[in-house]
Amino acid sequence: MDFKPTEEQVFIRQAARDFAENEIKPGAAERDLNAEFPTDIVRQLGELGFMGIAIAEEWGGAEADNLSYVLALEEISRADAGVGVIMSVNNSLVCDPLDHFGSDQQKEKYLKKLASGEQLGSYALTEPSAGTDAGAQKTTAVRDGDEFVLNGTKAFVTNGDSCDVTITYAKTDPQAPSGKGISAFLVEKGAQGFNVGKHEDKLGIRCSDCVSYSFEDCRVPAENMLGEEGEGFKIALATLDIGRLGIAAQAVGIAQACLDESISYSKEREQFGQPISHFQAIQWKLADMAMEIEAARLLTWRAAWMRDHGMRHTMESSMGKLFASEIAVKAGLQAVQIHGGYGYIREYPVERFMRDAKITELYEGTSEVQRLVIARSLLAD
């Protein structure tokens, strides 16, 4: 593995860093406070090619590699993790499955607009009673001529109110056992019977909207089925591999922001006549944070590199996501500790980083699920 980024990767990373510093970071605290969706920023991300980084130019993307994707996503999340998850969902959970499982007709109609940022996508898998047990879907899709009729409820849909199209999973064979008989559908916003529920009032990543969906006799053209009938759970699992890679990059970005702010503050804050950065207790915290962040970053890069080289990376993506998310939470706690009482007030950004970090241990599979995925990979024959 060559650790030296290519010229293209360096360019993409720097472009993401510049945009994050100049356009995203200044308004992050206000968006967090008001739970304000960053419409203009998302549009600009699309113009920069960041909403479909690894998608071919033919289908509206930037045609870069997955390592470029995680490099850019880290920089965006470093400024505002809420913006980072909007970008991650569109890239990982919407554009990627459309690219791998969509028909040319679906790519022409949907992927071009999603990958270019002209439109935004969401991903509706989780249900009130089907979270970690995603195979226990209760939303149904019944064939009626050239259409499927969807009924059911989805929960915790990121980009759910701001999107133009959602990938929704439903049971097309109600008699099939858990994880079987599930199909994926492209459902357009505004379809009759497709209702958006309340916005969740979240602990962190507050500028990204998170809503529930209800489908009440919602008619979807049969041609909008993604992949083959009954392949939905397979599509969902394949999608989660790249989704976890995106969340790992998001977590690394949050953790790096914690370290950046902690270093800066420790040099400025004086106690007992000297900057607190001179105290060994603070130095050790900074050293541990830096070491753990770099380890998380390398795990994430390895998984992205494996994907770019056509290698199976289920275990490696889970490792990256698990380690990076736990390091992000730890870095958030340490950053607040280094800031002392000031870390507990909104005037300083580390309290936001701490709140943002926690979700990375929960979505795209909890830390407990990641450990199960890793263990099963190790024990497989």
Image (cartoon, rainbow, N blue to C red):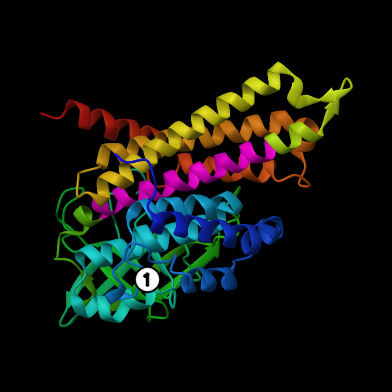
Disc 1: which residue:
115
Residue 239 in the image: above or below residue 371: below
Q: Please, which residue is most extreme toward the right here?
A: 273
Residue at 37 percent of width and 40 percent of height: 3
Residue at 37 percent of width and 52 percent of height: 6
Residue 233 in the image: above or below residue 378: below
Residue at 54 percent of width and 40 percent of height: 358
Q: Is residue 289 visible?
A: yes
- Could you tell me residue 365's position as x and y percent? 37, 43
Decide whether the magenta segment is chiefly helix, strand or loop: helix
Q: Is residue 129 visible?
A: no
- With 89 as the anchor, is 79 left or right in this view? right
Residue 214 in the image: above or below residue 235: below
Q: Nearer the viewer, residue 185 or 43?
A: 43
Q: Nearer the viewer, residue 312 or 196?
A: 312
- With 280 as the anchor, is 240 left or right in this view? left
Residue at 28 percent of width and 32 percent of height: 374
Please tell me in which quadrant of the rendered image residue 192 appears. Answer: bottom left
Q: State the SS at label 1.
A: helix
Quadrant housing the C terminus: top left
Give the residues drawn in magenta, as a range.
236-262
**What amino acid is found at the position of numbered circle 1 in the picture?**
Ala
Q: Nearer the viewer, residue 294 or 253?
A: 294
Residue 36 in the image: above or below residue 336: below
